[in-house]
Amino acid sequence: QVQLVESGGGLVQAGGSLRLSCAASGTIFNLNIMGWYRQAPGKQRELVATVTSGGSTNYADSMKGRFTISRNNAQKTVFLQMNSLKPEDTAIYYCNARHNFQTYWGQGTQVTVSS
């Protein structure tokens, strides 16, 4: 089993930055894929970015150039650096991990960007 715990959300003004962290715990040492998704009110959950255990990254088009995902395999932690935040980035951000056909989710952390 895997547990994911996010931290780092909060309120920030447009143009500001936030750094989200997600710590994984459990019996799996090196999760295949870790990433971030987000869900805004009234919208479906969408991909933000993912990173494999080998360091390959994938971003949603609207996040490219503003968000950077990284991970520390030894500490089983994934990070999301968010710069140039916009009001439309307001959402609950969920940590996600996938390993051997299993999917795990964190409880989410709120990010609110004021205009």
Image (cartoon, grey):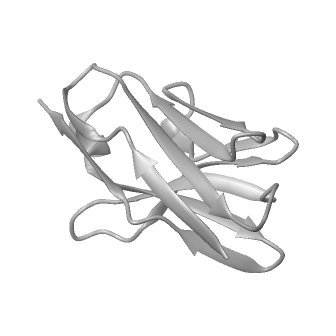
54 to 100, vertically: above or below: above
Question: Residue at the spot x=44%, y=38% of the render?
Answer: 20
Question: Residue at the spot x=28%, y=20% of the render?
Answer: 16
Q: Nearer the viewer, residue 72 or 37?
A: 72
Q: Is residue 47 left or right of residue 15?
A: right
The C terminus lies in which quarter of the figure? top left
Q: Position of residue 24 (x, y in %)?
A: 61, 56
110 to 114, vertically: above or below: below
The total of numbered circles placed on residues is 0
Q: Nearer the viewer, residue 94 or 114?
A: 94
Q: Is residue 3 left or right of residue 108?
A: right
Q: Position of residue 8 (x, y in %)?
A: 36, 38
Q: Position of residue 55 (x, y in %)?
A: 82, 38
Q: Nearer the viewer, residue 74 or 52?
A: 74
Q: Nearer the viewer, residue 89 or 99?
A: 99
Question: Residue at the spot x=75%, y=57% of the render?
Answer: 33
Q: Is residue 7 left or right of residue 91?
A: right
Give the image quarter of residue 42: bottom left
The N terminus lies in which quarter of the figure? bottom right
Question: Residue at the spot x=27%, y=32% of the render?
Answer: 86
Give the image quarter of residue 9: top left
Q: Position of residue 40 (x, y in %)?
A: 28, 60
